[in-house]
Amino acid sequence: MDEIVQEDWLDRQLREANPYIDDAGFTTRVMGRLPRRRRPPQFLRATILLTLTILGSALSFILSGNARFVTSGIERVAMLPLQWVFVIAGSCGILITSLGLIAAISKVRDLQSY
């Protein structure tokens, strides 16, 4: 029981604590004297990622037999009855709309909590 009271006291102290303790500029001076980290240029990172993505895509295209599975998949979908195409398209629409609604509600709750 004493442990619960102590946790409540600590929790209350942390919630009510002042987020900044005045240190007469000490933190600013220390941070100003620290050496700056040199970061690689952002365009270099983007170029590397884009190049690797293109190489990976080309390699998978070649190894998959020039993407024959894509054309066979399109042929299978084209052979489906029209009712099935409408059911699949409607189901996909409902699923995407539901996911968007869930994301919007989640975002609103996050914004309201501030």
Image (cartoon, rainbow, N blue to C red):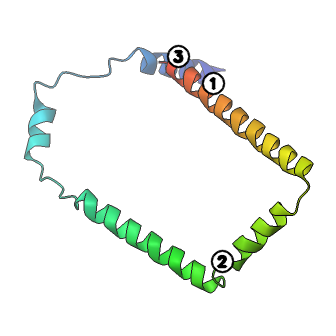
Q: Secondary structure at mark 3?
A: helix
Look at discs 1 and 2 and give the one toward the viewer. 2
* Picture layout, residue 4 above or below residue 33: above
Identify residue type, mark 3. Answer: Gln
Across and down, in percent, residue 54 comes to 45, 72
- Looking at the picture, tell me which residue is in the foreground, 7 or 44: 44
Looking at marks 1 and 3 on the same chain, the residue that comes earlier in the sequence is marked by 1
Residue at horizontal 87 percent and vertical 44 percent from the top: 87
- Looking at the picture, tell me which residue is in the foreground, 56 or 20: 56
Identify residue type, mark 2. Answer: Ala
The circle on residue 105 is 1
Identify residue type, mark 1. Answer: Ile
Can you tell which quarter of the image residue 79 is in?
A: bottom right
Residue at horizontal 26 percent and vertical 60 percent from the top: 43
* Picture layout, residue 114 above or below residue 100: above
What residue does disc 2 label?
67
Within-10-Å neighbours for mark 1: few <14, some 14–19, many 20+: few
Across and down, in percent, residue 84 comes to 90, 50
Looking at marks 1 and 2 on the same chain, the residue that comes earlier in the sequence is marked by 2
Give the CA separation, mark 3 to mark 2. 47 Å
Q: Secondary structure at mark 1?
A: helix
Q: Secondary structure at mark 2?
A: loop
The circle on residue 112 is 3
In the image: residue 86, left or right of residue 74: right
